[in-house]
Image: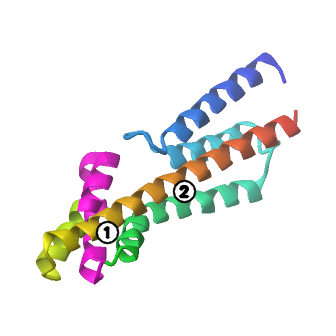
Amino acid sequence: MDTTQIIIFSLALLLMLVGVLGSFIPVIPGVPLNFLVFWGYGYYDSYGAYGFWPIFIAALATISALVFEQLAGVLGAKKFGSGKAGMIGALVGSIVGLLVFNIIGLVVGTFLGALSFEMIFSKKDFNEAQKAGLGALVGCFCGSMYKFVISFAITLAFVFFVIKNM
């Protein structure tokens, strides 16, 4: 590796680490950032360090993380005894919260969506509806953990492939 390649690799690795932190920090799109850096470095390197399959697998992992992030609150609400209304509320709340307030909105929106839909549409009292909201929060946390694992795995794959091909 020459100096330019070392600088590019170092910047890419720094962005990857920011992506890993983005699994938990609002306003940083962690997994998509990791994937874009992985793909971008491959393009820069003329796909010398890794080819189609690692990028394809990273793309599938990225998509799975983004989908699971949205569904995790729903699955958590269901696990804690929510009905269909609470699960729909968790999904609606997560999408609206994410669009309006980013990650903090995702968490709060998931909880409030499950809670309010259970109270309004399923006619449950606050204590029962609160369980659905708590389940949605637990699911949201699991979604964040999954995003962390995927971000970390893409980063490790990046380092492995680049060092392997030095």
Assess whether residue 69 is covered by the magenta stretch: no
The residue depicted at 27 percent of the width and 61 percent of the height is: 111
Q: Which residues are magenta?
A: 82-111
Quadrant location of the N terminus? Answer: top right
* Residue type, label 1: Leu
Q: Residue 137 at what x, y percent from top left?
A: 35, 59
Which of the two labelled residues, at mark 2 and mark 1, occupies the earlier sequence position? 1
The residue depicted at 74 percent of the width and 46 percent of the height is: 157
Q: Residue 155 at what x, y percent from top left?
A: 67, 42
Task: Count neighbours of disc 2 (C-alpha within 10 A) and say few if under 14, some if 14 to 19, many if 20 or more.
Answer: some
Residue under pointer 1: 91
50 and 109: which is toward the camera: 109
User: In terms of secondary structure, what is the magenta stretch mainly?
Assistant: helix
53 and 122: which is toward the camera: 122
Q: Identify the mark at residue 146; answer none if there is no mark.
A: 2
Give the farthest residue toward the top: 3
Determine whether label 2 and label 1 are within 8 Å by CB: no
Q: Is residue 91 left or right of residue 54?
A: left
The residue depicted at 37 percent of the width and 41 percent of the height is: 26
Q: Residue 90 at what x, y percent from top left?
A: 29, 68
Quarter location, residue 121: bottom left
Q: Is residue 52 above or below residue 115?
A: above
Q: Is residue 89 above or below residue 13?
A: below
The number of callouts visible is 2
